[in-house]
Image: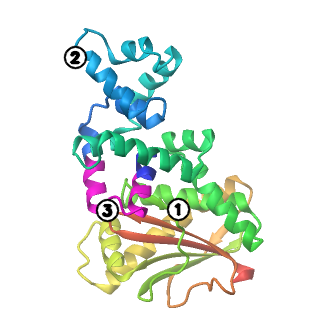
């Protein structure tokens, strides 16, 4: 998951194209992660130190970690942590980018430092990234929007967003990326579907995407050719929204906030950022951008 969010950062900065990023992420499965790249990825060694250890390995029969400790670049505790993470593969994207010659080791070091500073990630958030904890990652974005809009039930909106992302990963694209720019204005040619809930949580939920994404999304979820068939496409996207909200209703029941669902429907209007209170989170998938929107029924 850390690779995915680093990848999103590279896209936002214009350092990679989406095609190159996906190619690199596909390569990750075949990569045996080198300890030096991981140490640089973690920020415990510089590019120059890694190079020095690599050069020393050519002259002596010793492991990378042994030499790094001997030169004072790593502690034994840091080495143990790196060896554990080497198995988990948290820095494979960095290594793929270096191996393919897209960035040099020095350039990758600077990118990683800039990434850490810009995002100001806490230890908890870094752990969430490594473990793929979607709820932890979405929390600051959803909480900020709830606070600004003075919307209650933050935990419910957080759970809704977490589940939405997990369902995109499960049913649409395992490389789904949270768009931390959080755009709230869909394109003019958007396709939107809405489903209301009633009960302890009376909500209006939306799934929104542009026209091109719409048909590709429908094919991906429905697992059948759509070929611009409006009826088939609408049925597939409606099914995804209804499935997602059905799973959310299970969470709501367990949280003692029972709800019932109304049938999903196509919409031509969305909540107005200037007038309405709602949360909106956008995700990048292999078929395009997908936006989730949720408003309280009394507010929209």
From which residue to which does the magenta span run?
A: 7-26
Q: Where residue 282 sits in the image (x, y, percent)? A: 50, 68
* Residue 11 colored in magenta in the image: yes
- Identify the mark nearer the N-term, 2 or 1: 2
Residue placed at 69% from the left, 61% from the top? 143
The residue under label 1 is 180
- 72 vs 98: above or below: above
CA gap, disc 3 and disc 2: 37 Å
The residue under label 2 is 58
Numbered mark located on residue 267 in the image: none
Residue placed at 58% from the left, 61% from the top? 161
Q: Secondary structure at mark 2?
A: loop
Q: Secondary structure at mark 1?
A: loop
Instruction: Tell me which corner region of the image, top left, top right, bottom left or bottom right, holds residue 274.
Output: bottom right
The crowding category of the residue bearing disc 2, from other C-alpha atoms within 10 Å (few below 14, some 14 to 19, many at least 20), is few
Q: Main secondary structure of the magenta part?
A: helix
- Identify the mark nearer the N-term, 1 or 3: 3
Q: Nearer the viewer, residue 220 or 105?
A: 105
Residue placed at 25% from the left, 70% from the top? 224
- Identify the mark nearer the N-term, 3 or 2: 3
């Amino acid at each position: 998951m850390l690779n995915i969010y680093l990848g999103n950062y590279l896209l936002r900065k214009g350092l990679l194209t989406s095609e190159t990023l996906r190619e690199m992420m596909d390569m990750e499965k075949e990569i045996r992660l080198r300890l030096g790249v991981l140490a640089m990825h973690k920020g415990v060694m510089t590019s120059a130190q890694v190079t020095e250890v690599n050069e020393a390995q050519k002259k002596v029969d010793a492991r990378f970690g042994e030499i790094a400790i001997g030169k004072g670049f790593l502690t034994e505790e840091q080495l143990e942590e790196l060896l554990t993470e080497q198995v988990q593969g948290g820095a494979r994207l960095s290594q793929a980018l270096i191996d393919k010659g897209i960035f040099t080791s020095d350039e990758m070091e600077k990118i990683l430092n800039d990434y850490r500073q810009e995002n100001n990630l806490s230890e908890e958030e870094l752990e969430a990234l490594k473990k793929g904890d979607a709820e932890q990652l979405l929390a600051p974005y959803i909480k900020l929007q709830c606070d600004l809009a003075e919307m209650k039930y933050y935990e419910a909106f957080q759970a809704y967003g977490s589940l939405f992302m997990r369902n995109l990963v499960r049913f649409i694209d395992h490389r789904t990326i949270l768009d931390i720019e959080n755009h709230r204005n869909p394109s003019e040619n958007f396709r939107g579907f809405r489903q209301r809930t009633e009960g302890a949580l009376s909500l209006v939920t939306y799934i929104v995407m542009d026209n091109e994404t719409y048909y590709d999304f429908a094919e991906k979820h429905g697992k059948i050719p759509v070929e611009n068939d409006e009826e088939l496409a609408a049925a597939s996207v409606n099914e995804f929204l209804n499935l997602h909200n059905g799973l959310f209703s299970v969470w709501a029941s367990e949280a003692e906030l029972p709800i019932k669902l109304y049938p999903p429907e196509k919409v031509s209007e969305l909540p107005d950022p200037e007038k309405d209170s709602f949360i909106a989170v956008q995700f990048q998938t292999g078929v395009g951008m997908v936006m989730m929107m949720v408003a309280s029924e009394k507010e929209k």
